[in-house]
Amino acid sequence: MRIYRVLNRTVLISNYSWLDGLSFTGMRERYLEAFDKIWIDCLNGDKYKTGKVTPDGKPDPSIFSTEYNREGIQVGTAVTLLVRKEKHKPARTVSLRHFWGKEKRADLRIAAAKAKQIGYEKVTPVNEMGLSILSTTSGEGYFEW
């Protein structure tokens, strides 16, 4: 995990398991309380969760894959920008976008060069679901039991 701080912004580059892992509910809760805005670029490429394939079955290598090291790393990666304003209000939503496939590094460069918040979906973490940031579904009546 790498953490970079510049002024009131924090950039976290980490394994992406904290986005929905059951062991990280406290971490997600704290980030939502401590920061005003949260943007996450989920770079996927996880051997264990997705088998390194995209939702449509195409190859999804690690963002760290190179021509000399095709495997890269085994776990998925996320880049998170956390912003705390002087007049702080806890974040209620998280802006999330996914990068998939062999061209994700180029896609990420293009998104960064444009410096626009294109392709983000607003996610509202639900307390009953452990404040998961990745999409989760539950059956009808799940919250009633």
Image (cartoon, rainbow, N blue to C red):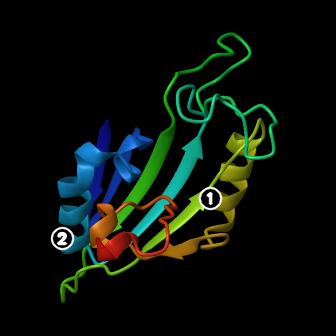
- What SS does tag 2 mark? helix
Image x and y of residue 96, in percent: 52, 65
User: Who's the residue at 59% across and 62% down the image?
Assistant: 97
Q: Can the viewer see residue 83 in this picture?
A: no
Residue 8 in the figure: left or right of residue 119: left
Quadrant, the N terminus: top left
Of the numbered discs 2 and 1, the one sitting upstream in the chain is: 2
User: Who's the residue at 36% across and 54% down the image?
Assistant: 11
Is 130 located above or below residue 107 in the figure?
below
Residue type for callout 2: Ala
Mark 2 lies on residue: 34
- The outermost residue toward the bottom is 87
In the figure, residue 60 lies in which quadrant? top right
Number of other residues with Cα within 10 Å of mark 1, as a class: few under 14, some 14 to 19, many 20 or more: few
Residue type for callout 1: Ala
In the figure, residue 86 lies in which quadrant? bottom left
Is 130 located above or below residue 34 in the figure?
above
Mark 1 lies on residue: 112
Q: Which label sits on residue 24?
A: none
- What SS does tag 1 mark? helix
The one nearer the camera, 108 or 91, is 91
Image x and y of residue 118, in percent: 66, 72
In the figure, residue 43 lies in which quadrant? top right
Is 60 located above or below residue 35 in the figure?
above
Q: Can the viewer see residue 115 in this picture?
A: yes
Number of other residues with Cα within 10 Å of mark 2, as a class: few under 14, some 14 to 19, many 20 or more: some
Is 4 located above or below residue 120 in the figure?
above
